[in-house]
């Protein structure tokens, strides 16, 4: 009775970010059937949350690549969805005499 459409339909009720998170979980597995249990767990975590919170958690999880139930539960428990995301800072490449470079190993 479980299918990818079943979980995507349930996630669609929360919003597009939650649907994208469920789709990413299903796509992350070699076979979609392997992700059904994870999807069930994630949607169970969202059972007590309102739609806005579920969407914020899903967006945060997608942004950091957290596709596991424990990571998503941690985002919920620590209210990380309510904190601004850390800006991605581009650091220049490290130049130093002790760095061998890519040609060293060829």
Image: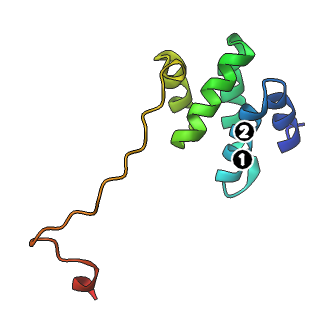
Residue 93: x percent and y percent? 27, 63
Circle 2: element type: helix
> Which image quarter holds the C terminus?
bottom left
Up the image or down, 83 lies above or below 62; here it is: above
Residue at (28%, 79%) from the top-left corner?
Answer: 102
Q: Are marks 1 and 2 in contact (CB under 8 Å)?
A: yes
Return the residue found at the far bottom: 106
Report crowding for label 1: few under 14, some 14 to 19, many 20 or more residues within 10 A (C-alpha): many
Q: CA distance from mark 1 to mark 2?
A: 6 Å
Residue at (49%, 22%) from the top-left corner?
Answer: 80
In the drawing, what numbered circle is on residue 66?
Answer: none
Please tell me which residue lies in front, 96 or 34.
Answer: 96
Please tell me which residue lies in front, 43 or 80.
Answer: 80
Q: Horizontal placement of 9 versus 37: left or right?
A: right
Residue at (70%, 52%) from the top-left corner?
Answer: 27
Tell me the residue that label 1 is attached to.
Answer: 26
In the drawing, what numbered circle is on residue 22?
Answer: 2
Residue 2: x percent and y percent? 85, 38
Residue 22: x percent and y percent? 72, 39
Report crowding for label 2: few under 14, some 14 to 19, many 20 or more residues within 10 A (C-alpha): many
> Which image quarter holds the N terminus?
top right
Residue at (70%, 21%) from the top-left corner?
Answer: 44
Up the image or down, 53 lies above or below 7; here it is: above
Circle 1: element type: helix
Residue 82 seen anywhere in this rendered image of the structure = yes
Corner quadrant of residue 13: top right
Please tell me which residue lies in front, 28 or 21.
Answer: 21
Please tell me which residue lies in front, 12 or 2.
Answer: 12
């Amino acid at each position: 009775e479980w299918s990818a459409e079943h979980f995507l339909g349930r996630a669609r009720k929360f919003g597009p970010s939650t649907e994208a998170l469920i789709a990413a979980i299903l796509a992350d597995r070699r076979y979609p059937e392997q992700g059904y249990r994870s999807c069930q767990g994630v949607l169970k975590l969202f059972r007590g949350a309102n739609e806005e919170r579920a969407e914020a958690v899903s967006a945060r999880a997608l942004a950091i690549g957290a596709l596991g139930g424990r990571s998503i539960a941690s985002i919920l428990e620590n209210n990380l969805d309510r904190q601004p995301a850390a800006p991605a800072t581009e650091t220049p490449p490290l130049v130093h005499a002790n760095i061998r470079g890519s040609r060293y190993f060829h």
